[in-house]
Amino acid sequence: MATSAATLDARTPADGVAQGDHEVEFEVSMLSGRRCTIRCPGAATLRELRVPIAASLLVEEAEEDSSAMAMLLCFAPLNALAGADDDASIGTEGGAMLLAYETAAWQLAGRCISAVVVQLDTTWCSGKRLKSSYIRGRRCGMQEEGKDTVLELQSNGEFTYSMHDHNHDHEPDFSYNHDQWVRARGHWTLEGEHGAVESERVVLVGTATTTVDTVSVDREVCNGSEEEHESEGEREVDNPNDVHTRTEGPFQLILTKIELMTPDPGWNSRGGWKSTDLA
């Protein structure tokens, strides 16, 4: 059963609600009676706060599975879940009104919201190695582009990700090579709307190292007399716009279940993944 998005009453900074790095405070309660108080920067979103809230409300469960990846923690205005039987229930036949994960903490300052837990089926992604490959060449390989991506989703909630994007073009008077590598690691979680399989998505959050190498060479034809040149030939001229960079920073990527479950159509077609079990 799909759920609907709830909206909070209009609230702006002019109302005195903190934003940005200013700390705010709000409460989260469950139908079981468990409650916790959350203090965080006003700019933090429910997506970013989901794991800390789970750790505060569900200490035993969080210790059992620190990644909380099989648990979808949803939030709603305090009265939206009235009539639900237990923490594993979401609303009635019409569906509960849930808060979007993009909801900022400053919008919740001084309020109390409800939290509900839904167990998601992670057998399709947990403990899997997912690979996507694409390559296409033209003119007997003189022109070529390709991309290889490997994603490993560990059952403990950690992931490793690597991507190599390559293309080259070799002409009689010009040569171009471009390579980009992204290597990332961190933690993954599974998100989605309750009862809507098509909404499920794997969220990767961590750090990444990105390396870019772009090299282009112009070839000048030497056409002079023997007094000027010993023989006719070519001289390679480096391009001042060549790029060689290596950067490190935060990494976030969202991949939908529909995307990851699409079969690999083969090397010469884009899209699709091959899935195998991790050893």
Image (cartoon, rainbow, N blue to C red):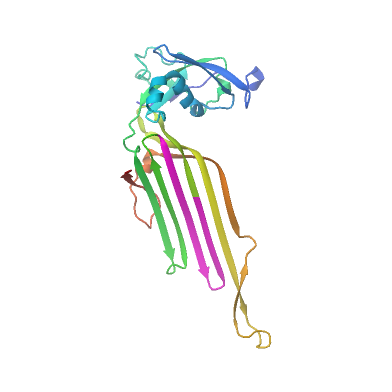
Span shown in magenta: 157-181
Extreme-bottom residue of the structure:
226
Q: Nearer the viewer, residue 114 or 4?
A: 114
Q: Quadrant of residue 135?
A: bottom left
User: On the rendered structure, is 225 left or right of 262?
Assistant: right
The image shows residue 126 at horizontal and vertical percentages of: 35, 37
The image shows residue 258 at horizontal and vertical percentages of: 37, 40
The image shows residue 151 at horizontal and vertical percentages of: 40, 44
Q: Is residue 11 above or below residue 162?
A: above
Extreme-right residue of the structure:
227
User: On the rendered structure, is 211 left or right of 230?
Assistant: left
User: On the rendered structure, is 110 left or right of 263?
Assistant: right
Query: What residue is drawn where x is 65% and y is 62%?
Result: 240
Helix, strand or loop: magenta stretch: strand
Query: What residue is drawn where x is 48% and y is 57%?
Result: 166
Could you tell me which quadrant the C terminus lies in?
Answer: top left
Query: What residue is drawn where x is 49% and y is 48%?
Result: 182
Query: What residue is drawn where x is 42% and y is 24%?
Result: 73
Q: Nearer the viewer, residue 262 or 4?
A: 262
Q: Count of labels shown?
A: 0
Could you tell me which quadrant the N terminus lies in?
Answer: top left
Q: Nearer the viewer, residue 93 or 144?
A: 144
The image shows residue 158 at horizontal and vertical percentages of: 42, 37
Residue 175 counted in the magenta span? yes
**Is there any visible trace of residue 148 in the rendered image?**
yes
Q: Quadrant of residue 3?
A: top left
**Is there any visible trace of residue 3 in the rendered image?**
no
